[in-house]
Amino acid sequence: MFRFLAPLLVVLLVTTPALAAPKAELWPRWQQNDPSATAVVDHRGWARFLASYVQPGADGVNRVAYAAVDPAGRAGLDGYLAAMGQVAVSRLNRAEQMAYWINLYNALTVHLVLEHYPVASIRDIDISPGLLSNGPWGAKLVTVEGQELALDDIEHRVLRPIWRDPRMHHALNCAAGGCSNLRPTPYAAATLDRDLDEAAMAYVNDPRGARLESDGLHVSSIYVWFEDDFGGDDAGVIRHLMAYAVPALAMRLQTLDGIAGHGYDWSLNDAAPTGR
């Protein structure tokens, strides 16, 4: 019996991430915030790492020089993550919280890759619990205010349900070539709205986000996996694209009524892939 089930399990493991994304289901404890708070989280440790190892490419893709990260760089990243685990997040204002969670997610992702490097794709880091799990997103990686959290928890139990901002998908980086860029500086509460707009514009106007081919509009699979966050249908996705597209692309998008196809590059955003 098991020899007949094995091929089915392989198919499920390979295709499940592309078929559906986790629902945005709020964990109520993370709703706590202090609108009057003036505390600013120190992201300088993350800033130093990004400045040292993120390399913008001529093709518009920001890649990470994972192989070049030295012991000092690792220690700096470890120290930053340890400090983030000590932050009283519920006592921050909303903008400071949002920047905190985005930076934490991205730093945890880079740290995760470094722990398993070299790998061809983050999906090869198969440490999530569960028989049908794939990749690292369900593994508990950090403790914040006494609660163990996975990358999935940060994205789908905190960020998406609290802020309901589709630009979030352009801020979070999953270490893949098809993902929105890893920003070379941390997100900051003081400039958050502008930073998110810039991230959205960079992705929408890049072939990774949207491109017009002979048979119509092809988009990143992000817009399909998280369609509910972008209006719930093709029309909603197109409206989102038009909001951030340069004029020439926006004019062409407004003539369309559907999406012809989608895709996603899961190869590692590695600045030195030949070193694997």
Image (cartoon, rainbow, N blue to C red):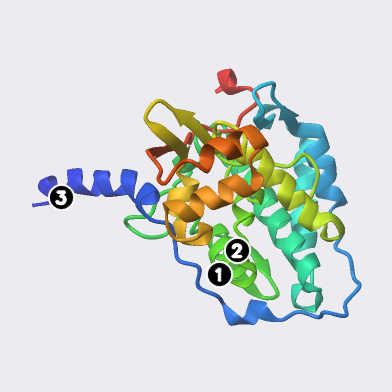
Rendering quarter of residue 270: top right
Report the residue marked by disc 3.
5
Q: Gap in Å between the C-alphas at discs 2 and 1?
A: 6 Å
On the image, the x and y values in percent for residue 269 come to 59, 32
What residue sits 82% from the left and 61% below the top?
A: 189
Disc 2 crowd rating (10 Å Cα; few below 14, some 14-19, many 20+) is: some
**Residue 211 as seen in the image, left or right of residue 78:** left
Q: Where's the C terminus, which quadrant?
A: top right
Q: Is residue 162 above or below residue 202?
A: below
What residue sits 48% from the left and 49% below the top?
A: 223
Report the residue marked by disc 2.
154
Tell whether label 1 touches label 2 (CB within 8 Å). Answer: yes
| Nearer to me, 34 or 127 | 34
Which residue is outermost to the right? Answer: 38
Q: Which mark is residue 183?
A: none
Rendering quarter of residue 209: top right
What residue sits 80% from the left and 66% below the top?
A: 96
On the image, the x and y values in percent for residue 246 come to 67, 37
Q: Is residue 269 above or below residue 169?
A: above
Q: Gap in Å between the C-alphas at discs 3 and 2?
A: 33 Å
Q: Amino acid at mark 2?
A: Ile
Q: Amino acid at mark 1?
A: Arg
Report the residue marked by disc 1.
157
Disc 3 crowd rating (10 Å Cα; few below 14, some 14-19, many 20+) is: few
Q: In the rendered image, is residue 136 in sight?
A: no
Q: Secondary structure at mark 3?
A: helix
| Nearer to me, 30 or 217 | 217
Q: Secondary structure at mark 1?
A: helix
What residue sits 48% from the left and 31% below the top?
A: 212
| Nearer to me, 8 or 19 | 19
User: Closer to the N terminus: mark 3 or mark 2?
Assistant: 3
